Amino acid sequence: MSENKKEKATKITAVKGMNDILPADAPLWELFENTVHSVLKSYGYQKIVTPIVEDTALFKRAIGAVTDIVEKEMYSFKDAMNDDELTLRPEGTAGVVRAVIEHNLVYDGPRRVWYAGPMFRHERPQRGRYRQFFQVGAEAVGFAGPDIDAELIMLCRRLWDDLGLEGIRLEINSIGDAAERQRHRADLITYFEANAELLDEEAKRRLHANPLRILDTKNPAMQDLVNNAPKLLDYLEGESVVHFEGLKRILDHNNIQYTVNPRLVRGLDYYNRSVFEWVTDKLGSQGTVCAGGRYDPLIESFGGKPTPAVGFAMGIERLVELMKEAGEPNDPSECDVYMVHQGEEARMQAFVLAERIRDAGLDVVLHCAAASGPGSFKSQMKKADGSGAAFAVILGDDEIAKRTAAVKSMRGAEGEQQASVPFDDVVDYLVNQIIGAHEHDHEHVHYHH
Ligand code: HAM
């Protein structure tokens, strides 16, 4: 065997933990994306797109050196062409903050922005946890009060409602400001030191670098220890208390159910004051579908003007999985109309008609030849059926001679029906039939104006 052939025979598969999103799942992803876009728009959020690759230093400084993400999950590499230290973004907030500062986006006041795209973390893959995953995130930059925190949370609730998702519960906490955390931290270290024999290796390592993160431990043997540890909430004073009470007041007033989870500390270092997570029990151990909070000091720490900010990000894979669990119909139909044709003249006419039908706003799949050839009428009709089209438009020698098309309804309640429609009337005929059916049962998904 030549080298060339050997190479061809070796199967290349996707990178572990990085998924293909296949056409069969595309309708659910699109439904999610369309719904979240319209909800974000209804709250005045504007889209921002930042690069997938950033300077490694950006993430180290924003997320924090002593965090799981920075210590062990980043895809970092040196650009061999110019020695730049780069990283595939593990999350979106750092890039947005960089862009806000770089383009002075808050020069004329606060801004609401949102983004969506792939993120990369070298985690151990399991259900709901991947090495490439997709987030939609929102960041409200320049707002100081608890009203914007509440608004972001209410935006999420509206999204769950619009998607028909139930059983997503809200946990909130406040992790105060730096001075409050400092006092708590000192007591926490004293407490953990007094119980040093109960700490696991990771906790020992983090004891002096980042003791707050120990509260996040999943180690069952440490749960009692952690539950009885000094609570950061008890260290809040003045403005931090006022802010947290203000947030709860707005949530209560708007009937948003939540629990205060004093152990909710988040895995990234940039947070202060309000933090929150939306969690479901329906996805096994990876049940957090959305998480976020305030990061008031971050922009200043990057050399920007002091600018308070708050945001969240949601995991799209997890939400699409929930939509599946909720029985959201995954309509795989490709089009409204499938064009079937036989013979050279019919093929030419089919192109013309298909374009005119598309001009009217309908989705059309024109049968095209496969490797095995153009296919018989029968095999083309099978394709039409499989496409999920509401109508097949059929052109053969007879139709060309009469300048009509055979229009066959594929999904009608009265079974399949066929009409002979003059070329010039085909568009009107289809639009009437499809809009008529749509007004009747609201089932049609493709027609858009
Ligand atoms: P995060 O908690 O690291 O926060 O991620 C937010 C959400 O992304 C998670 O709740 C989860 O739904 C999803 N997610 C995270 N890692 C994975 C993974 N390996 N596989 C699948 N889904 C995952 C952030 O990223 C912050 N930037 C959120 C934020 C924005 N805070 C303020 N603004």
Image (cartoon, rainbow, N blue to C red):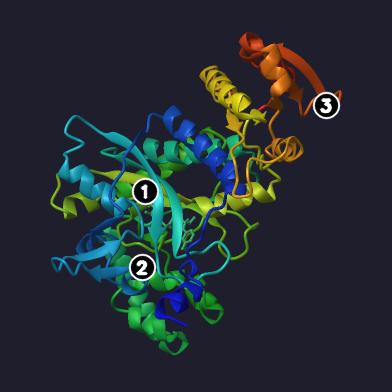
Ligand 1 located in image quadrant: bottom left
Residue sitting at the far bottom: 197
Q: Is residue 19 left or right of residue 65?
A: right
Q: Is residue 343 visible?
A: yes
The percent coordinates of residue 252 (x first, y second) are 53, 38
Nearer the observer, disc 2 or disc 3?
3
* Residue underneath mark 1: 241
Nearer the observer, disc 2 or disc 1?
2
Residue at position x 80%, y 25% in the image:
412
Nearer the observer, disc 1 or disc 3?
3
N-term-proximal mark, 2 vs 3: 2
* Residue underneath mark 3: 416
Q: CA distance from mark 2 to mark 1?
A: 30 Å
Q: Is residue 298 above or below residue 121?
A: above
The percent coordinates of residue 175 (x first, y second) are 37, 57
N-term-proximal mark, 2 vs 1: 2
* Residue underneath mark 2: 69
Residue at position x 41%, y 74% in the image:
214
Disc assigned to residue 291: none
Q: CA distance from mark 2 to mark 3?
A: 57 Å
Q: Is residue 404 above or below residue 13?
A: above
The percent coordinates of residue 290 (x first, y second) are 49, 51
Q: Is residue 276 visible?
A: no
Q: Secondary structure at mark 2?
A: helix
Q: Secondary structure at mark 3?
A: loop
Q: Residues within 10 Å of mark 3 (few under 14, many from 20)?
A: few
Q: Quadrant of residue 183?
A: bottom left
Looking at mark 2, is its residue's CB closer than 8 Å to ligand 1?
yes
Q: Quadrant of residue 69?
A: bottom left
